[in-house]
Amino acid sequence: MMSNNPETVSWLLGIDDPGVHYLTLRDIADVPKTDIALNKAAIVAHQDGTIGTVLDKMQPEGYWVKPGAGYGPKYKSTVWAVTLLAQLGADIRYDERLRTACNYVLENSLSPYGQFSYNGTPSGTIDCLQGNLCHALIALGCDDPRLDSAFEWMARSVTGEGIAPQTEKRNPLRYYAYKCGPGFACGANNKQACAWGALKILLAFSKLPENKHTPLIQKAIQIGVDFFLSVDPATADYPTGNPEQPPNRSWWKFGFPVFYISDILQIAEVLAPLGYANDPRMQHCLELIQSKQDEQGRLPLEYDYAGKTWGSYGTKGKLNPWMTIRALRVLKYT
């Protein structure tokens, strides 16, 4: 299986895109974090790349499109812009506007009890949003006690510890219509466990520094790992709202960026850094990724948000640097 193919790295570095150049050096080419070339590439990506383009669309207060919780409109408002910036490799160290954006999210999308919400209240919490924002803020370099409370809520919402049933209306630490029960239960999935939401939660935990992996968080991670490896991940045979409904075809369409819709590559992106890249149960998942590579290890773009979000990330069906970086990050663990 192709991981760090020199030809692929050369191809990535030869693409005229500051963001691709930066992520290739940071994540694929094994350049030391203290390297001058990496630092220079990061600065250029934040100033002249898509990171800078997205940040230029931010209002001075820290929001995109309109003030508030930032869920709508999709996929350009605050929630989506911040989620996108994390995937582009944005980092607070290189642009203070990112600190402003993170603080705006914490002020407007997070309830006092730790739930990220599409409407700013606890009732608006849902796993995919909670996971995406926890991951994004950690990835951007946010270090705020309020984010710690969000991770604790997220872990408790998975394990069920300290979270009241949905029927206890007066208890703020309870399940709601969307986040309706432990173990990734979601009202949008007919109260079944939602694998898309579960992936976002594990994505956030996989980014959290290990010194913050409390016993509660470790328990939540294990529940998530057991869920994803309870079936062959390459089949994506996870619960759907209708038992007779097959898995969503989007699972097999690898794309960039990734918002709440997930693909099988993201299962590997989550489980590999958690230590499961070489688990025999991951074999078919990794083979699926390999089957999409060309001779140099490059992947095409199969799913996109062209015209719907900030920036442009290639043409569907064509070999794509962002997709290739996603896959090579995973394969470095094998």
Image: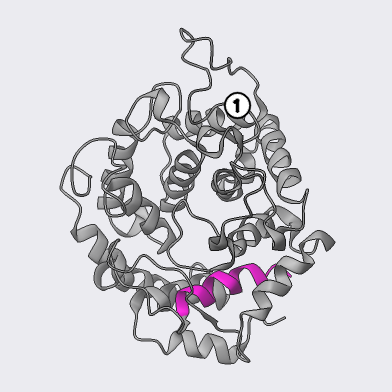
Whether residue 168 is visible = yes
Out of 86 and 119, give the one closest to the viewer.
119
Instruction: Where is residue 2? Give x, y as percent.
Output: 68, 82
Residue sitting at the far top: 170
Q: Quadrant of the N terminus?
A: bottom right
User: In the displayed structure, would residue 218 be above or below residue 297?
Assistant: above
| Residue shown at 49% from the left, 90% from the top | 11
Per the image, the residue denoted by label 1 is 181
User: In the displayed structure, would residue 46 be above or below residue 36?
Assistant: above
The part of the image, by quadrant, that contains residue 182 is: top right
From which residue to which does the magenta span run?
A: 321-334
Whether residue 36 is visible = no
| Residue shown at 20% from the left, 52% from the top | 58
Out of 42 and 207, give the one closest to the viewer.
207
Out of 87 and 42, give the one closest to the viewer.
87
Q: Is residue 40 left or right of residue 214?
A: left
* Magenta segment main secondary structure: helix
Instruction: Where is residue 312? Give x, y as percent.
Output: 31, 72
What colour scheme governs how the chains and residues are painted in the rendered image of this protein? Answer: one colour
Instruction: Where is residue 180? Give x, y as percent.
Output: 55, 26
Instruction: Where is residue 334? Give x, y as percent.
Output: 74, 70
